Image (cartoon, rainbow, N blue to C red):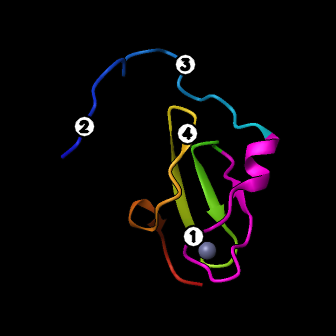
Amino acid sequence: MTKTATQEDSGTNSAPLSPELLDILACPACDDRPAVALTADNRFLECKQCKRRYPIHDGIPVMLVDEAIVDGKT
Ligand SMILES: [Zn+2]
């Protein structure tokens, strides 16, 4: 319900994440906090352990279990 609409029509919304930021990000769903990796399309951060994908909104990774996408089973 909290939709903050500012500027959603900007052409470039795929800002790459810095390696430093990627380095400190960890999956909040896994007990041992494994690192997450950018997906090929740069739109998600994927945990290799639980396979959750965390969306990246405007270059800011949303590391929330509730926002994570879980697709398929291994
Ligand atoms: Zn995980």
Element under disc 1: loop
State if disc 3 and disc 4 touch (CB < 8 Å). Answer: no
Q: Residue at x 63, y 28 (%)?
A: 15
Q: Which mark is residue 13?
A: none
Q: Is residue 12 above or below residue 71?
A: above
Q: How many marks?
A: 4
Q: Is residue 36 above or below residue 51?
A: above
Element under disc 4: strand
Asked if the beta carbon under badge 1 is closer than 8 A to the nearest atom of ligand 1, the reply is yes
Q: Which residue is mark 3?
A: 12
Asked if the beta carbon under badge 2 is closer than 8 A to the nearest atom of ligand 1, the reply is no
Q: Nearer the viewer, mark 2 or mark 3?
A: 2
Q: Position of residue 21 (x, y in %)?
A: 73, 45
Give the extent of the magenta segment: 19-40
Element under disc 3: loop
Mark 4–mark 1 Cα distance, whole angstroms, equals 16 Å
Which three-letter amino acid code belongs to the residue tagged 2? Answer: Lys
Mark 2–mark 3 Cα distance, whole angstroms, equals 20 Å
Which three-letter amino acid code belongs to the residue tagged 4? Answer: Ile
Would residue 64 be found to the left or right of residue 1 on screen? right
Asked if the beta carbon under badge 3 is closer than 8 A to the nearest atom of ligand 1, the reply is no
Q: Is residue 16 magenta?
A: no
Q: Which residue is mark 1?
A: 28
The quadrant of the picture showing ligand 1 is bottom right
Q: Which residue is mark 4?
A: 60
Of the residues under marks 4 and 3, which one precedes in the sequence? Answer: 3
Q: Which mark is residue 3?
A: 2
Mark 1–mark 3 Cα distance, whole angstroms, equals 28 Å
Q: Residue at x 64, y 42 (%)?
A: 42
Would residue 49 be found to the left or right of residue 6 on screen? right
Q: Quadrant of residue 27?
A: bottom right
Mark 4–mark 2 Cα distance, whole angstroms, equals 15 Å
